[in-house]
Image (cartoon, rainbow, N blue to C red):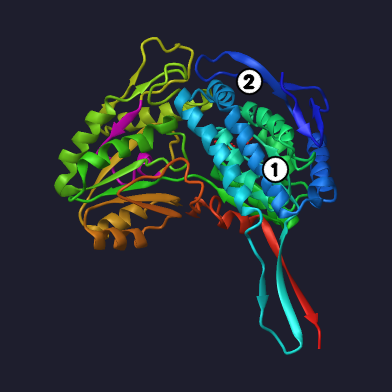
Amino acid sequence: MKNMLIGDQWVGASDGRTLSVVSPSNGQAFDEIPRGTAHDVDRAVQAARASLTGPWGQLNAMERGRIMMRIAQKVLDHEEELAQIEAKDTGKPLSTARNDIKVLARYFEFYAGGADKLHGETIPFLNGHQVSLLREPLGVTAHIIPWNYPAQMLGRTVAPALAMGNGTVLKPAEDTSLSALRFAELALEAGLPAGALNIVTGLGEEVGAALSGHPGIDFISFTGSNEVGTLIQQAAAKNAVKCVLELGGKSPQIVFDDVDVERAVPIIVRAIVQNAGQTCTAGSRLLVQRSIYDTFVKRVAEAFAKVRVGTPEMDLDCGPVMNPAQHKRVQRYIDQAREQGIPVLAEGQIAADAPTTGHFVKPTLFGPVPRTAALACEEVFGPVLAAMPFEDEADAIALANGTEYGLLAAVWTENAGRLHRVAKSVKAGQVFMNCYGAGGGVELPFGGTKRSGHGREKGFLALEEVSTTKTLVHYHG
Ligand code: ADP
């Protein structure tokens, strides 16, 4: 049983209730976490608020950066331990989990460097006046994260908030809270003052709702489903606080007839099977120019058929999906597409000795998928790739922009003019050109357009999101 961190206390839920932690690889419960309450959330928000006037709030930016750099080093020193925790909790292959922990450390390194580099400005104004713009923390920031990349998500959202000097409250996903709790121990060991980071574990409709609706917070960062994203915006509106939302995608891989096939095929396959397709940035639509559609899709199918699924220890291409609900959801998309007669072009293989109680699904490539089919428009959040032909540049752009989402896109062509024209016309927060950037990319501003959300995480822009300005106007005569 792991406890939550509120201020400097490791505590259970105020009413003593717990949640089981279940392995996606075999369906067995192997640990417990507190099922936090609204009362726990209230205490965590108070602890974060108190930190702003306590030792944490007294630190200057350089000192905050130094502590964050020590946290990054602690994470790297415990990389294997954290990766084992993460792999067991999420079911992902061990090497993916190891990479996730490296990325967690990288977030703290990057934002440690940023802590003292977001400078203010001076502004020309009336004679006799000196105007300066100060950067200040927002105050108490709330962070609600999903279960697909627990450690990376923690780094992505909490590190910039700490760099700017906020007091933070994190609610990890109920399925995957273990790496956050171990991380918090390491952060305190590295010298993070009490109250700067608080973690309340528990259910979304209990802890998540209490946190997002708490009148004592100044900001919400949320990554997850569109449905909950709407609730978060409503909660933010009630308290008039800012929110940054990342709500998923249906990202297109746009492949023109002059594509470098050898380069593109493995990257395209990896972009959908990585993390069993449970990646907001998964390249889930394969749009291919009709003149090469058959030959190119055949090459993708050959690579797709070699994808192998297993437990973390087997360390194959991907693991199980997260939980029974997700398994049912992904399987339903696959079954419905088959019932609609959409051809299956390839299936990956589940390892023969993978436990039958695990939440494994066969990665599946469908095509050609009708443009109006659910598979062409909806986020599956599983290892399912929908191939579709397009005619020309204009058709490719229309098809790429034809969903409610706009998170990522990739353009594949050796024609530089076309590469840039299409990249500029596609609605997305990031566009990759002859490459695909799922994972890592700590330095690169990231976020959505349309239903994929708003606000920016990663890169330097994230520091602006979690800080505010104060304009000082000084009359000196
Ligand atoms: P997913 O489909 O990835 O589970 P969710 O949007 O349901 O996406 O969950 C993402 C995060 O939001 C999790 O930490 C979850 O506990 C939390 N959450 C779920 N429901 C709510 C809610 N009503 N209010 C606030 N947070 C919630």
Q: Quadrant of ligand 1?
A: top right
Left or right of 270? Residue 360 is right
Amino acid type for the residue under numbered disc 1 = Ile
Residue 103, how many percent across, how many down?
52, 38
Left or right of 163? Residue 384 is left
Note whether ligand 1 is within 8 Å of mark 1.
Answer: no
Q: State which tag comes first along the sequence, 2 or 1.
A: 2
Left or right of 197? Residue 394 is left
Label 1 sits on residue:
67
Residue 278, how many percent across, how many down?
46, 34
Residue 211, how many percent across, how many down?
73, 42
Residue 339 higher or lower than 28, as above or below = below
Residue drawn at (26%, 28%) of the image = 346
Q: Which mark is residue 21?
A: 2
Q: How many marks?
A: 2
In the image, 50 versus 248, the foreground residue is 50
In the image, 11 versus 339, the foreground residue is 11
Q: Quadrant of the C terminus?
A: bottom right
